[in-house]
Amino acid sequence: MNPKLTTLSLTCALALAACGGDGADQQDTTAATTPAPATAPATDTTNANAGSVPGDGMGTDAGMATSQDPAATAGADAAPASNKPEATVTNCATTIQGDDAMQFSVGSITVPSSCSEFTITLEHTGQLPVAAMGHNVVVSQASDRAGIATDGMAAGVDGGYVPQGDARVIAATELIGGGQTTSVTFPVSALQGGGPYEFFCSFPGHWAVMRGSIQVG
Ligand SMILES: [Cu+2]
């Protein structure tokens, strides 16, 4: 009896020491806080890592998963471009950038009401060719964006992914590739109807995320 009791006591003492109250509390707190911010990326990383058994391959797979993200986001139409800055407007004109990460540099353009015409210049600051990462700037009623982009697919890359002679299109630049610049000028009165108006890139998939508001202010 005595030896057994001693052993039990020792085991209990060791177990208590191993999972002491303070240590357990700290672990719980950490576990509760950590997963919350990383919800969506964590899933992707887990899947990518699960596919690659060797340790060395994990880095490569994670990188590929990241580069596929823009294509995945292109399907999500819901996200408004609200975290982008307002375009700088000078002399009834503005210059905005598009890049290889499928992003415009601004989320909103306010056209001064004193202007009769307005010019938007687009600089493609990336390096990818027009067929892979072409960008343009199309201005229309926000409610016409999806229709113009969908119909514009028939025009193809040579037609700039904009339907020809489409009355819904208020303005449209050429479709350009990395390192190129283009611009378009249109009458401000075209933005003084119902609205709301948007500017967007009509390249297939881009129009879901490359967009912002444009209004006369
Ligand atoms: Cu684009």
Image: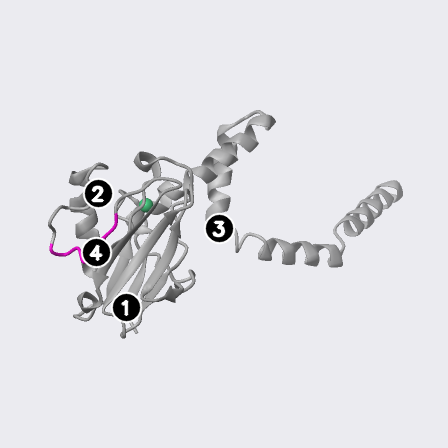
Per the image, the residue denoted by label 1 is 215
Q: Amino acid at mark 1?
A: Gln
State the CA–CA distance, disc 1 to disc 4. Answer: 14 Å
Q: Quadrant of the C terminus?
A: bottom left
For marks 4 and 3, the one nearer the N-term is 3
Q: Few, some or many C-alpha atoms within 10 Å of disc 2 (few <14, some 14-19, many ≥20)? A: many
State the CA–CA distance, disc 4 to disc 3. Answer: 40 Å
State left or right for residue 64 relative to residue 18. Answer: left
Per the image, the residue denoted by label 4 is 171
Disc 3 under 8 Å from ligand 1? The reply is no
Residues in magenta, as a range = 167-173
Q: Is residue 170 magenta?
A: yes
For marks 2 and 1, the one nearer the N-term is 2
For marks 3 and 2, the one nearer the N-term is 3
Label 1 vs label 3, nearer the camera: 1
* Residue at 29 percent of width and 64 percent of height: 214
Q: Amino acid at mark 3?
A: Thr
State the CA–CA distance, disc 1 to disc 3. Answer: 35 Å
Q: x, y percentage for residue 109?
A: 33, 64
Question: Image quadrant of ligand 1?
Answer: top left
* Residue at 30 percent of width and 72 percent of height: 112
Q: Secondary structure at mark 2?
A: loop
For marks 1 and 3, the one nearer the N-term is 3
Q: Amino acid at mark 4?
A: Ala
